[in-house]
Image (spheres, rainbow, N blue to C red):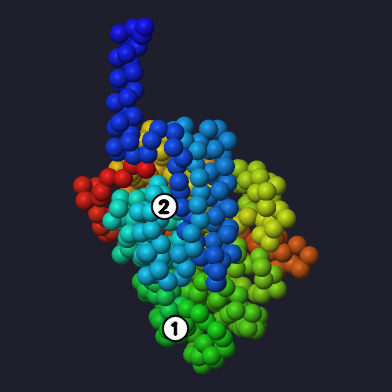
Amino acid sequence: MKSLLQKAFGFVLAGLSAVSAAFGAPAGAPLIIAHVGPTTGRFALHAEADRRGADMAIEEFNARGGVLGREIILVSRDPTLDAGRAARVAEELITQTKVGFMVGAIHSGVAASMSAVCQKHGVIFINTNSSAPSESVENAHRTKFVFDTSAANINRALLKYALASHKSKRVLLLTEDDEWGHSSAAASRPYIAEYGGTVVAEVVVPESLPDPAGALRQIAAVRADVVAVNISGDNQIKLFAQIDPQTLKKQSWVVGEVDWEELYPAPGTPRPLFGTTWAWNLKTPGTAEFVARYRKRYGHTKLDYPGDVTHAAYLATKALLTAIERAGTTDNHALIQQLENYKSSPKERMQNAAAYMDPASHHLQQSIYIARWNPQAEHPERGIEILGHFPPEQVRYERERATRLESLADTPHYAP
């Protein structure tokens, strides 16, 4: 015969199970996270690098029992590069696959589309690697957290450096015809004016960029001291493969952001100054250990050294899982509050300065590194050279102070 105390305890457990069934997944059920990144096209390698970072973070948590006693399962979906298709994929993941969270994106237009669907349902969207400035201003949401730096942050540092060495300070904008390109170019204009420069022309190229030769002829016809490049993905490889290295010496070319996936696969392609958030050869605490762990698992693959994309996805996914642990729940309102207060030490970030989440824009404020690329045929991984570091307060995108997010009250509850 059970004692009265045992029976009472049984009733409590039954009640908790009923609550769990009504408001979330059954206790101990796997926690499903969807990784969304384009597996074909010009960002396919980026998406693979991003998925590896997310997987490495999940592997860490599962090795010690998951999160809140639940195994974490990563599923992958290709949203393509079409914003309409991406929105439908997000809807299917939430309503049919019943995912708990989404991480990834890469393409800023896709990130904007999918995160709007996530906001409608209350699903937290971790934007690991989309760097359009609009992601943390016009396209920001209460349920979206952006962990990549933006082109606005990088251009603020690069343009000041480039314009300081020219008397006339004439700037040509080379802009990709998509959300990232236009948003990045628009964010650059106030900095150009602030540093005494003048925009003398803007050359807009198609997102597919079949052949950059025409754009290069247009650029050559304009008298400019600085060329501010806002072109992403494999388009950078196409562009710089056709540029005479002497041109890069005569003019100051700067690139808003260059990912490892645009450098390492094309070691013979020259690059001007660019910005990044991390490199495998930084002498920062934790970097060597992270690289060793990555190479043990992926050292036989095309990307046998990790880059900034893997680094960002790893730390972003880790931030999400840590927030769940600290909140003691998967309820999105509790997790939003945790993530809005996210802070990370230099050691945790493997960077030179602490990072923190801006609660107003949901954009991570972090270190920026100015770098150059000196490719070496035998050891292309050694081609990246870090020239300088800017802490987050020096590269802040001022428009983020005016970002307006949906209120928590207007954000549906979601507890996977």
Pinpoint residue 256: horizontal percent, then vertical percent.
49, 69
Q: Is 59 left or right of 321, judged from the image as shown?
A: right
Along the line of sight, which residue is nearer the eye, 325 or 72? 72
Marker disc for residue 204: 1
Q: How crowded is mark 1: few (under 14 residues within 10 Å), some or many (20 or more)?
A: some
What residue does disc 2 label? 97
Is residue 243 among what the camera can see?
Answer: yes
| Point 67% across, 52% down: residue | 298
Q: How crowded is mark 2: few (under 14 residues within 10 Å), some or many (20 or more)?
A: few
Q: Is mark 1 on a helix, strand or loop?
A: strand
Pinpoint residue 106: horizontal percent, then vertical percent.
48, 63
| Point 57% across, 88% down: residue | 213
Query: Which amino acid type corresponds to the residue marked 2 in the rendered image?
Result: Thr
Query: Which amino acid type corresponds to the residue marked 1 in the rendered image?
Result: Val
Pinpoint residue 312: horizontal percent, then vertical percent.
52, 53
The quadrant holding residue 27 is top left
